[in-house]
Amino acid sequence: MSARKQYGGGLAVFAYLTLALAALVLPSCGTKETCSNPAGASCPSSAPPTTLPATTTRIVAQGSDSLESETVGFVVFNTAATGTLGVEVNWTFATNDVDIYLARGNEPCTEETFTNGTCTFVATAESGTLKPERLTVPNLAAGAYTLYLANFGDTDESVAWQVTLTSTSASSASSATAASVRRGAGKRALNRIHDLR
């Protein structure tokens, strides 16, 4: 009889030791104990959650007008914050080549400087095959800009444009300077430059 009591006591001790060992090895869940290894995977992060600034997209210019063959039309607009400028221009005939040019300031190009390639642009989109033509300029500083639409095609066009600015609440604090580019040399001469409505 005493042998049975010893055997039964041995099982109870074994079960108790197994539970104690498991409690030491396994991480505790839901306890308020201090984490012994803050970099470990089982410890919660003490850093506050990262909150990204809100992003907003605004239309800063849009419209439509006629654009004769071999002419340039321009639109002046202003941006109030640094951000990513997006321009989309569409037209009627896929056989015509309409390109986009963006310059800093109010009407900085003349017919002469545009035609001879000396007018300096912030960015250009000069594809001969894309329709609509699109231009994206990241980190563009706030200020006045002029959008030029050039119809290098053989027929008159109806063009439509939209300019958007995507910015964050913190973006007005940083000022970016865009690189200067020139008009492609392979494009034909243009006859006239006028404002678009």
Image (cartoon, grey):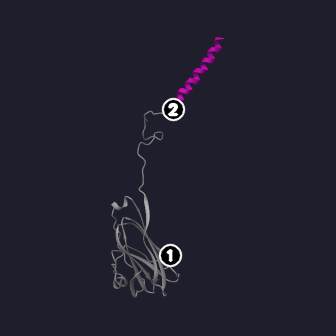
Magenta stretch?
1-30
- Return the mark for residue 191: none
Residue 5 higher or lower than 155, as above or below: above
Q: What residue do we see at 60% from left, 17% from top?
A: 9
Residue underneath mark 1: 132
- Measuring from the top left, give residue 181's x and y in whole percent: 36, 75
Give residue 33's position: percent from left, percent from top.
Answer: 44, 33
- Residue appearing at x 50%, y 75% in the figure: 132
Question: Magenta stretch: dominant SS?
Answer: helix
**Residue projecting furthest to the front:** 197
Q: Helix, strand, or loop for circle 2?
A: helix
Q: Secondary structure at mark 1?
A: loop
Identify the mark at residue 25; answer none if there is no mark: 2
Image location of residue 123, percent across then percent down: 39, 73
109 to the left or right of 6: left
Q: Closer to the camera, 82 or 176?
A: 82
Type of amino acid under label 1:
Pro
Quarter holding residue 177: bottom left
Residue 13 is covered by the magenta coloring: yes
Mark 2 residue type: Val
Q: Quadrant of residue 54?
A: bottom left
The CA distance from mark 2 to mark 1 is 64 Å
Q: Residue at the spot x=66%, y=11% of the render?
A: 1
Residue 119 falls left or right of residue 88: left
